[in-house]
Image (cartoon, helix red, strand yellow):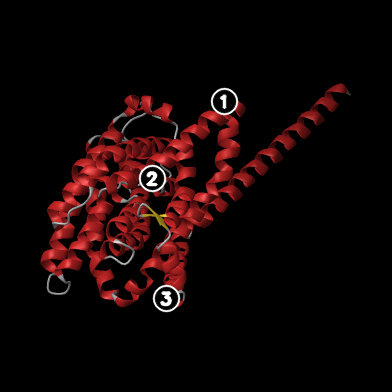
Amino acid sequence: MKLNVLKKLRKQSTSIISIYSNVRILEANILEQRLDVFSKYLTVWVGIAMFLGAILGNILPGLSNSLGNWQIANVSIPVAIVLLFMMYPIMLKIEFKEIVNVKKNSRPLLVTLVVNWAIKPFTMAFISWLFMKIFFNPIIPDGLANEYVAGMVLLGLAPCTAMVLVWTYLAKGNINYALVQVAINDLVILFLFAPMGKLLIGVSTGFPVPFSTIFWSVVFYVAIPLSLALLTRRFVVKRRGEKYLNETVIKRFDPFTKIGLLLTLILVFMFQGKTIIDNPLHIILIAVPLLIQTYLVFFIGYYAAKKLKIDYAEAAPSTFIGASNFFELSIAVALILFGMNSGAALATVVGVLVEVPVMLSLVAIMKNRKGSFTFSKGRGQIK
């Protein structure tokens, strides 16, 4: 009798465990679908934000001018606010203690740093100069061409920070390693963005760039959210623990990244609405060198990762960081240096327009060639 009862209990417990497992799987699938709503239809959301911004800029020019004039020390306060919305949640995810673990698998980081800082800025400066100053010289006035080049150089100087996490997630790469790469790139930006920007813009356009302006832009748009995030992590971990930070605090702030991105695009397109409508051909012309640059840098990283036998999980973010851009910083610096209605600001905005569909195509390329990036088992990696 007891044996029969025990057997029934075992069957019931097994059924309960099975049901619980199925429920958990279902919850995970639902959560993944919810997360994908933004990522899967990213181009649509971005397109809507751009369209809405352009419309608002044209039908409400007074609002656009008022927001554009709201500045402190030439820093656009509306842009600064939405950038903080976007950057803070991303910075909050960065675990700086993981940087020390990079030595276990440093090759992906090496690819990222070499491509981002020894190759990408110079190829962008050359390609943009070649197209704007030589190929398109009969179409685009020289002064405007210089501004377009300057804007594209700013894009080339800013490796991706926030959106690379979306691309890595869609490609099913190693998010933790991507976060470490982002953290290190942010630190490098603090030191190299200003001097390289002054050098490359000066050489390619002859425009005298104030070093202090670029420097304080980096401090304002990178250093401040990075510092706030680091202080938040320390405070929360000390009071409530790391589990509470990861499962509660970060999840609560995560939607602000998406909101910040869309608001940034709406604001920028409000400022650029008239320029975009007045110069549709110029948008296409700017997009040409940006497309070439993006695919060129991606495939440089792609073949470097294969040559160094980097496994897919880390190869994916390594190729994406160089190919995509920290366009929020580029836009902010362009607005400060050249103004709301400048060609430089327009070029950085076109960078956003080009980046989303192109990066989705690069995600597809990486996923389709995932099998060619399986080189080792058990190698030390950041998980």
Which of the two labelled residues, at mark 1 and mark 2, occupies the earlier sequence position? 2
The residues bearing labels 1 and 2 have C-alpha atoms spaced at a distance of 27 Å
Residue ID at (64%, 41%): 24
Left or right: residue 160 compared with residue 95: left
**Residue most extreme to the front:** 73
Q: Nearer the viewer, residue 306 or 155?
A: 155
**Residue most extreme to the top:** 2
Left or right: residue 379 compared with residue 139: right
Characterize the local packing of mark 1: few (<14), some (14-19) or many (20 or more) Cα atoms within 10 angstroms. few
Q: Nearer the viewer, mark 1 or mark 2?
A: 2
Q: Nearer the viewer, residue 101 or 65?
A: 65
Disc 1, disc 2: CB below 8 Å?
no
320 relative to 61, above or below: above
Characterize the local packing of mark 2: few (<14), some (14-19) or many (20 or more) Cα atoms within 10 angstroms. some
Q: Hey, which quadrant is residue 144 in on the image? A: bottom left
Q: Hey, which quadrant is residue 287 in on the image? A: bottom left
List the residue tagged with mark 2.
Answer: 220
Residue type at tag 2: Phe
Q: Nearer the viewer, mark 3 or mark 2?
A: 2
List the residue tagged with mark 3.
Answer: 58
Residue type at tag 3: Asn
The local secondary structure at tag 3 comes to helix
Residue ID at (31%, 62%): 339
Disc 3, disc 2: CB below 8 Å?
no
Q: Nearer the viewer, residue 338 or 348?
A: 338
